Image (tube, helix red, strand yellow):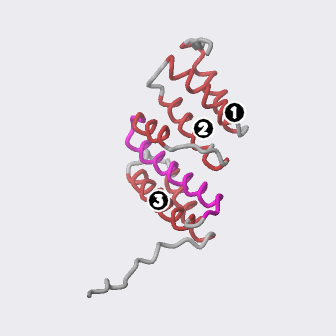
Amino acid sequence: MPELKSLSQEAIPAALEKAERYRLLNEPGEAESICLDILATDPQNQAAIITLLLAITDRFSKGYGVSDTPANQLLARIKGEYERAYYSGILAERRAKAKLAQGSPGANHYAYDELCEAMRQFELAEKIRPPGNDDALLRWNTCARMMTRNKLAAREEDRSEPVLE
């Protein structure tokens, strides 16, 4: 593999804009590559970490066999408590959406569990949100509507008693 070229510190703001543009153009692979270049130059760049996390999770619904391990590793690198809770919610919400899109057996139960986790994270974020920032509340409402629209519910627990011999 050819040796990768290094991005200059001065180029990071423009590179972040390009990464976001590629995400909006539904090109998560390009956004991911740019973020990796930024992080090679500035490993703690929070905007690049978050954009990379979003680019990775953009792939969940595309049918790629994408593991959420890299996304979880990126979550651990997010510094703010609010941001970590908020993006944990985003990760769970996107896993739920991807599972619903697959339509596989058990998808609705899995999606329900993931949406519950997302809503729990959004509630944590809502409690510590900056003034005037209701993003977590908006995401919580989206999850609630998704549950209603897809008629998602908790699994019924097996309440039968074990047979004693």
Q: Quadrant of the C terminus?
A: bottom left
Residue shown at 38%/49% (left/top)? 128
Marks 3 and 2: CB-CB under 8 Å? no
In front: mark 3 or mark 2? 2
Q: Nearer the viewer, residue 36 or 140?
A: 36
Q: Whole-Å distance between the Cαs marked 2 and 1? A: 9 Å
Q: What amino acid type is highlighted by mark number 3? A: Met
Marks 2 and 1: CB-CB under 8 Å? yes
Q: Eyeballing the image, is 92 above or below 1?
A: below
Q: Is residue 97 magenta?
A: yes
Instruction: Look at mark 1 in the image and give the residue it sits on.
Output: 22
Residue 145 in sight here: no
Measuring from the top left, give residue 62's x and y in whole percent: 67, 47
Measuring from the top left, give residue 3's x and y in whole percent: 59, 11
Residue 79 in sight here: yes
Q: Earlier in the sequence, mark 3 or mark 2?
A: 2
Mark 3, secondary structure of its residue: helix
Residue pushed farthest right? 25
Q: Is residue 90 magenta?
A: yes
Q: Eyeballing the image, is 106 above or below 67?
A: below
Residue shown at 51%/59% (left/top)? 140
Instruction: Look at mark 3 in the image and give the residue it sits on.
Output: 119
Q: Which region of the structure is painted magenta?
A: 78-104
User: Is 73 positioned to the left or the right of 102 in the image?
Assistant: left
Mark 1, secondary structure of its residue: helix
Q: Eyeballing the image, is 62 above or below 113?
A: above
Q: Nearer the viewer, residue 116 or 12?
A: 116
What secondary structure characterizes most of the magenta part?
helix
Residue shown at 63%/43% (left/top)? 59
